[in-house]
Image (spheres, grey):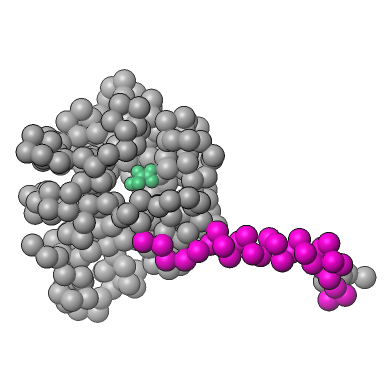
Amino acid sequence: MTQLSAAQTGKTSSSDGSKALYGGKGTRRITVRDIALAKERGEKWPMLTAYDAMTASVFDEAGIPVMLVGDSAGNCHLGYESTVPVTLDEMTMLSAAVVRGTQRALIVGDLPFGSYQEGPVQALRSATRLVKEAGVGAVKLEGGERSHEQIRLLVESGIPVMAHIGLTPQSVNAMGYRVQGRGEEAAQQLLRDAKSVQDAGAFAVVLELVPAELAAEVTRVLHIPTVGIGAGAETDAQVLVWTDMLGLTGGRMPKFVKQYANLREVMGNAAKAFAEDVVGGTFPLEEHSVH
Ligand code: KIV
């Protein structure tokens, strides 16, 4: 099934368009209830990662309705080689900054590796920190059937959960970075994972690096929204890591990334221009001086 954009379907919202997640006129914080209503309307929505207050404020002003303080901060912000070393203290600090920098977006804080795998009680303790200390509106954790009980307890305790299946980067040491769900058995497992997180009460599920046809089927079968990254065009929402999307990340990009700017070049050129001005004595000028 091809999903049309909200604008194409004309089902964005009430008659004045005020309820659309993107482009809507509301200024209060988006909630998981708004996300559920968007799925009912067949409205697609964008999600970006954010790791600091200033970047988050730019995306908030641009109308991005959902921001993920992803543990991709490990690679994109903290200089680790993967998401595995990221700690709950780090996620709490980054999530609090993103909450402070935003007014409208729903902020989803990622539970890092080691903060929920022991079981539901550990997951609740970790998620409670993100909600109470950072102020996030929801948390995200990886895993389908294997994380069912964790999701169930968080949701029963009043913490909205975004699930994450397909490629789960915290398991890089076990599964590598490979497309998931290829072949009949793997596809069936992905469908079981998707239904399991929905049954546990997740309000949305990220599908990472999954064949487009399978992601479309999951999107058709579930009543909660799917958020795709490398999962084709038919998921309800799309997420990109902001440093990839704006061309700040160096090196080769995965095929699923679309680069909307080249910040690495812009920032590098600006840094060189500043350095040359300083070395050549053309900065500061009289206009930059105080007397
Ligand atoms: O940590 C992250 O940024 C993520 C997204 C890629 C979904 O999990």
Apparent side of residue 107 relative to residue 58 in the rendered image (left or right): left
Q: Residue at x 42, y 40 (%)?
A: 71
Q: Residue at x 18, y 76 (%)?
A: 8
Q: Residue furthest top?
A: 118
Q: Residue furthest bottom?
A: 16
| Residue 151, position as x, y percentages in the image | 23, 34
Instruction: Assess whether residue 274 is covered by the magenta stretch.
Output: yes
Q: Is residue 24 above or below residue 117?
A: below
Q: Residue at x 27, y 25 (%)?
A: 120
Quadrant of image for the N terminus = bottom left
In this orientation, which residue lies closer to the viewer: 289 or 53? 289
Magenta stretch secondary structure, dominant: helix
| Residue 182, position as x, y percentages in the image | 15, 41
Apparent side of residue 187 relative to residue 102 in the rendered image (left or right): left
Q: Is residue 160 above or below residue 39?
A: above
| Residue 276 appears in the figure | yes
In this orientation, which residue lies closer to the viewer: 34 or 178? 178
Residues rendered magenta in the picture: 258-287
Where, by quadrant of the figure, is residue 189 drawn? Answer: top left
| Residue 128 appears in the figure | no
Q: Residue at x 34, y 23 (%)?
A: 122
Q: Is residue 238 above or below residue 129?
A: below
| Residue 154, position as x, y percentages in the image | 27, 34
Dividing the image into four equal quarters, which quarter contains ligand 1? top left
Apparent side of residue 268 relative to residue 223 in the rendered image (left or right): right
Instruction: Assess whether residue 42 is covered by the magenta stretch.
Output: no
> Count the marks: how many?
0
Quadrant of image for the C terminus = bottom right
| Residue 123, position as x, y percentages in the image | 32, 28
